[in-house]
Image: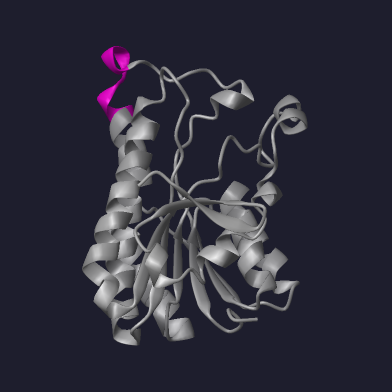
Amino acid sequence: MALDGQVVIVTGAARGIGRYAAHSFAKQGMKVALADIDGEALKNVARELEEMDVEALPIVTDVRDEAQVAAMVQQVVARFGRVDVLLNDAGIVPHFNWGVQRWAPIREMDKAFWDRVLETNLEGTFLCTKHVLPQMIKQGSGHVLGMHGGGGGVGAAAYVVSKDAIRTLMRFIADEEREHNICSLALSPGGAIATEEAPEEARSRLPAPDSLGDLFVQAAQAPMELSGKTVTIRDGRFETIGS
């Protein structure tokens, strides 16, 4: 396995897509650093990976806090010596497809709520990437992965703005770090996903995280010619979304 022994950081790893991605990487023999704000749930995922004979390092981290992010990356490098892949999954998602009440339209949205979504989804991706890039440059290689998601309709403005901005961020990273052999991608799940926390009705109707197959494993090995692109996976192959 090409990823065997490599090191990955997964943010938002305590549940949902992040947890699924962590398991996907673990099955490839990777050493997995798990970052999330929920310490107890994080420990549970770490135990799951350790039962697979995988080295797992859970680190409670608020990706909105630069000091915490910097300390998290330092801890990973101190433990494993490198960072080969960063998956920026931590985020606040509207989950309207689960029957969750819609967020307020822009004219009624509280600024604190807008800030929390943008700071978590976009700025968290920026901060984690900022602090991982120097290590990847030192190594001369790496993959930086951001999560994209669209749609949602009225009430989803903060979420969609943050996710569209992540696409742009990945393009800039691609341009800035290509000479260092660092590949950046925005990954799309291709639609709504019902995680383990979704209501039973939603889980009976929507695909689970395992519908993503080996999206994360393939993205962690993507060739440089895809750097800066937004991709999803269909029939086991990458499909580029947009320009």
Total number of numbered discs in the rendering:
0
Task: List x then y, in percent, for residue 197.
Answer: 66, 38
In the image, residue 132 lies in the stretch drawn in magenta: no
Task: List x then y, in percent, for residue 191.
Answer: 57, 36
Residue occupying image coordinates x 70% and y 51%: 210
Q: Residue furthest toward the left?
A: 176
Tell whether 129 sits left or right of 101: left
Is any atom of residue 40 visible in this view?
no
- 131 above or below 2? above
Give whichever of 166, 203 is nearer the camera: 166
Tell whether 140 sits left or right of 200: left
- 54 above or below 195? below
Dominant SS type (magenta): helix
Determine the image quadrant of residue 108.
top left
Residue occupying image coordinates x 41% and y 17%: 154
Determine the image quadrant of residue 78.
bottom left
Q: In the picture, which quadrant includes the N terminus? A: bottom right
Task: List x then y, in percent, for residue 213.
Answer: 67, 55
Determine the image quadrant of residue 170.
bottom left
Tell whether 49 sits left or right of 186: right
Residue occupying image coordinates x 58% and y 84%: 5
- 207 above or below 51? above
Q: Which residues are magenta?
A: 106-113
Give whichever of 110, 212 is nearer the camera: 212
Residue occupying image coordinates x 43% and y 86%: 81
In the image, residue 108 lies in the stretch drawn in magenta: yes
Colouring method of the image: one colour
Task: List x then y, in percent, for residue 65.
Answer: 30, 54
Tell whether 235 sits left or right of 14: right
